Image: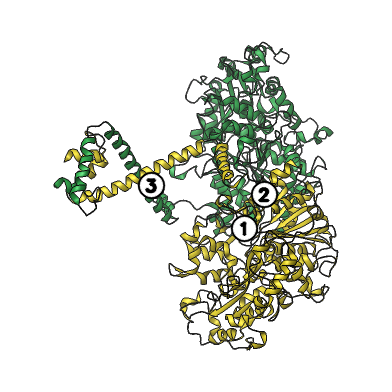
Chain colours: A green, B yellow
Amino acid sequence: MPLLRRRRPAHPPPQIDGPSTSAESDEKEKPSLPMARKPRWNCVDSCCWLIGCICSLWWILLFLYNAMPASFPQYVTEAITGPLPDPPGVKLRKEGLVARHPVVFVPGIVTGGLELWEGHQCADGLFRKRLWGGTFGEVYKRPLCWVEHMSLDNETGLDPPGIRVRPVTGLVAADYFAPGYFVWAVLIANLARIGYEEKTMYMAAYDWRLSFQNTEVRDQTLSRIKSNIELMVATNGGKKVVVIPHSMGVLYFLHFMKWVEAPAPMGGGGGLDWCEKHIKAVMNIGGPFLGVPKAVTGLFSAEAKDVAVARAIAPGFLDSDFLGLQTLRHVMRMTRTWDSTMSMIPKGGDTIWGGLDWSPEENHSCNGKKKRSDDSLVSQDVKEEIMNHQANITNYGRIISFGKDLAEAHSVKIEGIDFRDAVKGSNLAHSNASCRDVWTEYHELGWGGVKAVSDYKVFSATSILDLLRFVAPKMMQRGSAHFSYGIADNLDDPKYKHYKYWSNPLETKLPNAPGMEIYSMYGVGIPTERAYVYKLSPSAECYIPFQIDTSADGGSDGSCLQGGVYLVNGDETVPVLSAGYMCAKGWRGKTRFNPSGIKTYIREYDHAPPANLLEGRGTQSGAHVDIMGNFALIEDIIRVAAGATGEDLGGDQVHSDIFKWSEKINLQL
Amino acid sequence: MLRRRKPEKKPEQETPPPALASVSVPASTTRPARWSCVDTCCWLIGWICVSWWVLLFLYHAAPASLTQQVTEAVTEAITGPMPDPPGSRLRKEGVTARHPVVFVPGIVTGGLELWEGRPCAEGLFRKRLWGGTFGEVYKRPSCWMEHMSLDNETGLDPPGIRVRPVSGLVAADYFAAGYFVWAVLIANLARIGYEEKTMYMASYDWRISFQNTEARDQTLSRIKSNIELMVATNGGKKAVVIPHSMGVLYFLHFMKWVEAPSPMGGGGGSDWCARHIKAVMNIGGPFLGVPKAVAGLFSAEAKDVAVARAIAPGVLDSDLFGLQTLLHIMHLSRTWDSTMSMIPKGGDIIWGGLDWSPEEGYDCNDKSKTDNVPHASEDFQARVDNFHLNKVNYGRIISFGKDIAETASSNIERIDFRDAVKGNNFAHLNASCHDIWTEYHEMGWGGIKAVADYKSYTASDFLDLLHFVAPKMMQRGDAQFSYGIADDLDDPKYKHYKYWSNPLETKLPNAPDMEIYALYGVGIPTERAYVYKLAQPAECYIPFQIDTSAKGGNENSCLKSGVYTVDGDETVPVLSAGFMCAKGWRGKTRFNPSGIKTFIREYDHAPPANFLEGRGTQSGAHVDIMGNFALIEDILRVAAGATGEDLGGDRVYSNIFTWSEKINLQL
């Protein structure tokens, strides 16, 4: 009977006749006890029980979370870390700043969203869904289909037939790159605090895969930007716009400024004073004015940390053969169809980036940074650097070296055999069908070509261009129609009217707009890729013949060589030299590149990593993308948007050696 | 005993999970009962969760095409082969994108987002307050209400609050998740080659008056600039404009604004429309207003906020959480100037007087018969027979009591309310009502009685009625809108912007090559006139309400639940949507001096055959018509370069031409 009492609650029995039901259940259980099925059923049972518990708990927590007042998380954070500083927008609003000049955002590479407008069968149901940006769900679900739709045509650099992938428009195009990963959102929110709204903010979204001129040819993006800026100026009582380009957007906007004043049909036909009439300031954030060394490795061996964001999302994914796909090669094939990547190849050759024997940054001490960040004992520091000089000199000018020895050897000892005339061998063993569809041009190079490349041993910025032309002739043929990497001897040469020079600051003049201001704002204090040690990779079925020699490390902890990469000061992507040189020297005062004497300012932001996890990506970060949440930078932007000039901000703000390094560059101005 | 219990809950005898053990140990006499119940619940939930996840995983893991094939196969098995969407079909015919298109969304369908708010709206920055999930309506209703309201006096933002329209195609492609508005049309246009550079969503803040969208947001300038840009970047091909619902009136306003000299207008010059617009394809346009707006403004029984009501049917009618929801809605919508743009225009000449109305012969149940067989002559005969039985006085837009609505006009003794003194002896003038701004508590008993004593209101009387019951609101409205008929269109007073959205007080632009289409659904009973009663006095209340007990004699009567219905698209009666294109602008008239060609395209309503069809591909309902394949095909053809003649000219199912003839308007 006690047994019966115990069991009843489990199955509340009908009250009619208790004994019979209990007997029934007893009967049911007795025979089942010894059977092997019972424990298994129980296992499933308790699993279900556990999951049920967790689910219920989760729902309760979720409900509580949703029911909780919105200010609660902030309260918790403040309890732990002490009061948070006011966001700059709130602070400046209290100071009485209000929206004045309309602002234009020009997003950089990879941060802008792309959506599908027309696709092949495999992309059914993705109409107007994001292929790039957002959750990237499709990369995992149908990777091949995704790669197919993200690639452009090899020959034209435009849409492949039957596929139309277009940039997302509006502020949503680049406010968040992926859920929770802000790009422009923090800046937008702070601008809104002082009164900005959508009619005074414009996101100049463009298809960042295309070459700059092609965005106009295909989408009329440049015309669109021109028209929107004109509209904003007209509807805001003639107040000029403040343009805020980020990353590659900086080059895109340089191109725009030339385009808009050039006569139609190649240009926008805005007249010679368009920039003067419409632009108050261009506030470049982390601009790769002179290119980035990262672009070289990206194009050369697909070890593109330039697609760093993509890699951050799927770290293992790119390096392994996932599901039998040669991921790295697919990435290479895809990125090589994107003309825009070629806009960031280092410009200015050896004059800017250094030759075999010298480089502007050669004295940079890679561990001096940490000491200097807090106390600015410059004089002492300099002394230290001089002491380190002999020990620590790095040949940054050798952007690619085959082997660590060559990177460090004296230039006299290097015997380079010229590769330019080398015959590309047709005896490449691996030119079989399975590789053909992955278009990287390497299987056309042959053994002879690969050997010739490595025999040249050391490549400086100028010879890199020849190298790329050698290993990827088709790609560079497209590229050279849209971009140029030289230094102009005579800027008045009529050939410089061609659009391919417009994004190279060393081959164009700034517009005739003495009232305009150009800012160069970038983070410093993070080791940034500058030169590489390469090796030949072991042969395999389908492979990329060159790869970074990750085993090459400097002798000491403080060495600049880490994992086959020589590092220098910068914002993790763009070295200081590229981001700062033009504003520090190339355009400073009246030069031949800046004939009207547009004022330039350098604003550096020293990197401080977030103090704890709750801060997220930090409010004092100097990293290439995270700097968009840097409070000091946001404050500068808001002040300028509210009417301040560069002098009001306090002129230059410099933490790095940019002026010293700029002096070493022997460029005719 | 112990052995018996074991299999119930413990898989391993030696190592029970700690959680399980701790629960089962104290199980002695009463505990097991509760424990088991919780246990079973957990087990059940866990089981459901797991199977759900498995299904979800399978669904996602299956290639998308498979899922689609299955769905299609199921649908086809039930309904027979699905027709190709018009975009795919026309593409096969070789139709490609040609003219840029501009969408002008209507009231309530456009999204609104928060740019600046009070502390209660923290965390909602750039989140949608209107459109999307409407999550905040439930979470913080009074906060939401506060942010959606506008200022009583100015009709603009209250201090410290900035709610702005969403921009881009996302502004109105879907109203709520899964409830399409423009999305189907956009998808079909994309099939023939359109993309974002050739499609522009002219989203505007639909709460404020048309001219104020320019004053506050420069929306009209923005539209002008975007159309100019699209025309310029498409080799000078003119734009096809597709306004929907209130967007029709907004675009009428735009066409006058753009050619008017600045500062009041856009200064585009008098040939701007001729140079930039190929065709205006009005979908379900309330050119002459909608009677629904009457009920909405008069007693907040706005089925015009029908979508909102569809989302939360019970909420509006009950006192939820102690909020007088209906009063709040009234408070909210009365601050929106735009609702006043849809008050019936043209007065008795258009909408009928006490004794007559253009639609008076309409037979409410012949619809189902004529659906398939268009034997007009027979039909007409039948109607004549029914005439005397079934005569409805549509002209009496508001009647107090069913008797009044039906009796001959000579039997109505009306006492004029216009001079009635508003009583200040209103019993309910207490503090709790004051914060709900509806103006009714200023009216007093005397005023209410005077309104009811007038008994029957025509379209012209109704304007006076609104001025009487809501003087402050109408004062705002009078500055922005006008509802009359112009005697002399060249009178300089008609240069003022308040006339621009009334087709009876403006001339169409001088653009002889332009085409104007009226595309609308027919075959759905649509509100046309109301039977009202006085409401039971209560603490805070709206003194008038629709007498839902008033019903017609037989099943086929036009009177149902206090509402007289007529042919239309559920919101806009045929008369309002079609009259201007059928008669007012047909040929060269004084309203259309350059002889712009007009076309009427009606789409007969057919409800979706089954559940799988969703909202149907042959619907004629006001919003659902945006997914009507025939309508989409017409738009695609025009966008690809066809003219109205190429489409086949007029396409008419209703009696719009007969009814238009009855209207005695000087043209």
Q: Mark 1 vs mark 2: which is more N-terminal?
A: 1
Asked which secondary structure carries label 3, the reply is helix
Please provide percent x and percent y for residue A278.
74, 51
Please provide percent x and percent y for residue B43.
32, 44
Q: Amino acid at mark 3?
A: Trp
Q: Are marks 1 and 3 on the same chain?
A: no
Residue A480 in view (yes/no): yes
Q: Amino acid at mark 1?
A: Gly
What is the quadrant of the C terminus of chain A in the image? top right
The residue singled out by tag 2 in the image is B186
Is A566 located above or below residue B336 in the figure? above
Q: Residue A239 lies in what quarter of the image?
A: bottom right
Cα–Cα span, label 1 and label 3: 35 Å
Please provide percent x and percent y for residue B429.
49, 82
Q: Nearer the viewer, residue B518 or B138?
A: B518
For image coordinates 69% across by 25% down, the residue present is A350
Please provide percent x and percent y for residue A664.
66, 29
Q: Nearer the viewer, residue B606 or B494?
A: B606
User: Badge 2: how crowded within 10 Å, few (<14), some, or many (20+)?
Assistant: many
Q: Residue B398 lies in what quarter of the image?
A: bottom right
Numbered badge on residue A58: 3
For image coordinates 29% across by 49% down, the residue present is B38
